Amino acid sequence: MADSRVRLKKTNPEVLIGNLRGEVGEAITNWIILRHLLGSANHLQTDDIEADMKNESLAFINALRDRISNDLVLTLAELSEQKIGQTTFYFASEKLGTLQDEVQEFRRFIVANKLKEKRNREIAHREQPEEWPQKGDIRITYKTLTVAVAKAIRLMKKVDSEFLGKEAFVQWQKMRATRYDLAMPARAKYLLLPHMRDSR
């Protein structure tokens, strides 16, 4: 507990919130990629299940889709953790001294929709069962991921509003216009959000 208090006091809020925004940016970009992959898969799929199973392009897209989906689950679950010293909404809210209720609401959604459980059981920090698991894989729908990303964005905007002030709204509007430009790594692009200039 003492170490957490020291870490909370010493952490530069600009570094913490910048990195948090970068993580949310990664989630946004993965969601964009996932949406594109789903569209590509739907375009390639036919009514012939046997032919679809032999389609190497479709198999590649589906494998990539699963990896991107898992990475998105991982990021969102990590953001919801109640930990000091890691890039989480909880750490940011404790540092700023506000938004605790909003952070808890985000965490409840992540837990209730089994993103945290899927992260723990199937993706990272894997819990080692004593026997072969009786349950099948946890399926997180695209709709659930979309809602989770939207909640993360809204919460990040609130954090930025507390930290950056009124300019946060304008900067996020500018970022939205460049959301689909993947030339720059998402983490770096969103980290630099406070310094964005109008492209005109």
Image (cartoon, grey):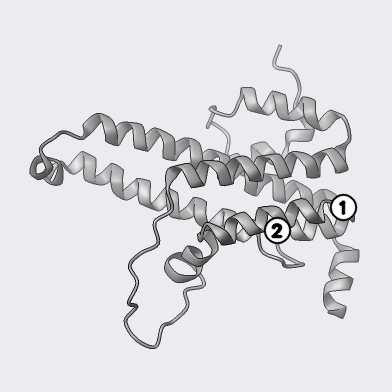
Question: Regarding mark 1 in the picture, which secondary structure is present there?
Answer: loop
14 displayed left or right of 22: right
Which residue is at a point 65% across and 36% down the rendered structure image?
189
**Which amino acid type corresponds to the residue marked 2 in the rendered image?**
Thr
Which residue is at a point 79% across and 29% down the rendered structure image?
169
Q: Please, is residue 122 above or below residue 177 in the view? A: below
Which residue is at a point 72% across and 58% down the rendered structure image?
104
Residue closest to the far front: 112
**Which amino acid type corresponds to the residue marked 1 in the rendered image?**
Thr
Name which quarter of the figure residue 196 lies in: top right
Question: Regarding mark 2 in the picture, which secondary structure is present there?
Answer: loop
Q: Please, is residue 190 above or below residue 139 in the view? A: above
Residue tagged 1: 98
Where residue 163 appears, as percent x and y from the top left, is 86, 43
Q: Of the two numbered discs 2 and 1 on the same chain, state the one appearing first in sequence.
A: 2
Where residue 97 appears, as percent x and y from the top left, is 90, 56
Residue closest to the far top: 200
Label 2 or label 1, whichever lies nearer to me, is 1
Crowdedness near tag 1: few (<14), some (14–19) or many (≥20) residues, C-alpha within 10 Å: some
Q: How many marks?
A: 2
Q: Please, is residue 200 above or below residue 163 in the view? A: above
Residue tagged 2: 87
Where residue 49 appears, as percent x and y from the top left, is 12, 43
The CA distance from mark 2 to mark 1 is 16 Å
92 displayed left or right of 61: right
Crowdedness near tag 2: few (<14), some (14–19) or many (≥20) residues, C-alpha within 10 Å: many
Q: Please, is residue 165 above or below residue 27 in the view? A: above
Which residue is at a point 79% across and 54% down the rendered structure image?
101
Quarter of the picture containing the C terminus is top right
Name which quarter of the figure residue 152 lies in: top right
197 displayed left or right of 186: right
Q: Which mark is residue 148?
A: none
